Image (cartoon, helix red, strand yellow):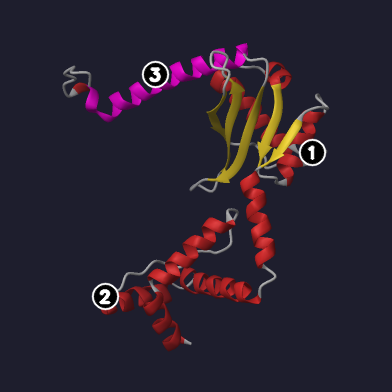
Amino acid sequence: MNSVELGETYFTRSACTEFIDHISSVMKDDLAVKLKECPFFSVMIDGSTDHGVIEDAIMYVRYLEKSTGRQVTVYLGIQEPKAGTGKGYLEAVDSCFQKVINIDLVTWKQKITGLGTDGCAAMTGEKNGVLGLLRHDNKEFMGFWCGARKLELAVVKCLEDFPEFVKVRDVLRSLYQEYHYSAKALRELKELAEVLDDQISKPTNVFGTRWLPHLQSALQALFRGYRPLMIHCQNTK
């Protein structure tokens, strides 16, 4: 890098981990300085379940860059809420501000002006949601429902009026249940695909928090393994 001979010392996993840790510390310190200088900012937060089935909240902060006058959105951190309630998520936000950039509760509450979420009750509830709890201190506080999420829900609602769509969705759900809960059926399907020299993907769940991506994945699995899926279904029912 930059014509400097690094040798082998800095190519180990531990060395890379140390570099990342130092880089992270510098980035956090830089963000802390900018947010403390900034008169106001907003936060985007979303809850998700990781592979360990642990609920996590990922947070981003948006502020006005003083030197350029432009809006900047940066990653703030991931925090596990103590509970999946408005109070639990609010405590997670506070913990993230304090641990990542050392800004106390009073300071960030005075500066935060808006909250962007996916629209779930724990986030947007007027009484016990994060939005409602923050409005206790600031009546002008603004909440924003993710536009992409609202569009997704609108599409789902519209499609439910079409019998053809409901039928396709039910078929995809049946395929997922058949091969998810039956190891025997899945094994037979894979063996059949090998005989036919076809590729096969295990049918996925069409239902989920992110509905459109789930539907896309389920359809891709169906199209990729259409022939073995049809043959197997015809011979086992």
Residue 77 drawn above or below residue 65: below
Q: Nearer the viewer, residue 134 or 3?
A: 3
223 falls in the magenta region: no
28 falls in the magenta region: yes
Q: Nearer the viewer, residue 27 or 152?
A: 152
**For residue 153, which quarter of the picture?**
bottom right
- Lateral position of residue 54 relative to residue 143, left or right: left
Query: Measured from the top left, where is residue 101 in percent x and y?
Result: 56, 18
Q: Residue at x 81, y 39 (%)?
A: 126
**Dominant secondary structure (helix, strand or loop) of the stretch shown in magenta:** helix
Q: Quadrant of the N terminus?
A: top left
N-terminal of the two: label 1 or label 3? Answer: 3
- Lateral position of residue 116 relative to residue 31, left or right: right
Spatial CA span between label 2 and label 1: 56 Å
**For residue 161, which quarter of the picture?**
bottom right
Amino acid on which the number 2 mark rests in the picture: Asp
Q: Nearer the viewer, residue 157 or 13?
A: 157
Q: Which residue is mark 2?
A: 197
Count of numbered tags:
3
Amino acid on which the number 1 mark rests in the picture: Asn
Q: Which residue is mark 3?
A: 22
Q: Secondary structure at mark 1?
A: loop
N-terminal of the two: label 2 or label 1? Answer: 1
Q: Secondary structure at mark 3?
A: helix
